[in-house]
Image (cartoon, helix red, strand yellow):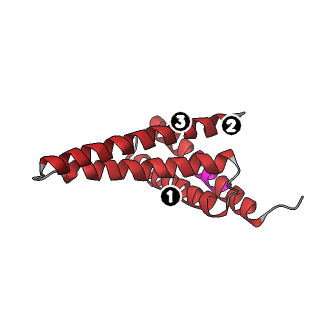
Amino acid sequence: MPIRAGDQLVSSRLLILQSKRMLLTGAKRKMNASGSEQARADVGRYEAAVAQAHARYNETVLRWGSADTAQYRLIAYGSLIVKAERLRASLLVAGGPMSPADRRELISDVAVLNSIIANWRGLSRQSMLEAVA
């Protein structure tokens, strides 16, 4: 079976992410051994590089990965959960003066959103178990 271009892109991004994580681990060891300001700055730079590589990996999986893999589902649910949590937070701080009917509707919306998030977390855990198995 031929290798799909999307799979190659995902593998490439994963290798980059793993490389950045290894560099970060080495920088942390060096910082713990020396404690120098330069070592601390290096750790900060590598942490930012790892976060960026992780975001790019997730984007690549969502764009080019196969939707029938546990890896894809895990990242997709994670992305949905983050977005739903942001929405919930913005609803909770929306506050301000509201009529009792609007307040009840807001509370109801947040409760439904909490339920959706809980369901997505369960599906995410299931995908994680499938990815490990």
User: Residue 11: x, y in percent?
Assistant: 71, 56
Labels 3 and 2 touching (C-beta < 8 A): no
Residue sitting at 46 percent across and 47 percent down?
Answer: 81
Q: Secondary structure at mark 2?
A: helix
In-image side of 78 versus 112 (left or right): right
User: Residue 110: x, y in percent?
Assistant: 31, 44
**Amino acid at dot 3:** Gly
Q: Which residues are magenta?
A: 15-23
Residue 52: assigned label: 1
Residue sitting at 74 percent across and 59 percent down?
Answer: 7
- Of labels 2 and 1, earlier in sequence is 1
Q: Residues within 10 Å of mark 1 (few under 14, many from 20)?
A: some
User: Residue 49: x, y in percent?
Assistant: 50, 56
Q: Residue furthest bottom?
A: 5
Q: Is residue 83 magenta?
A: no
Q: Is residue 18 magenta?
A: yes
Q: Could you say which is closer to the camera, residue 56 or residue 70? A: 70
Residue sitting at 53 percent across and 36 percent down?
Answer: 122
Residue 130: assigned label: 2
Q: Secondary structure at mark 1?
A: helix
Q: Residue furthest front?
A: 101
Q: CA distance from mark 1 to mark 3?
A: 27 Å
Q: Where does label 3 land, which residue?
A: 122
- Of labels 1 and 3, earlier in sequence is 1
Q: Residue furthest right?
A: 1
Q: CA distance from mark 2 to mark 1?
A: 26 Å
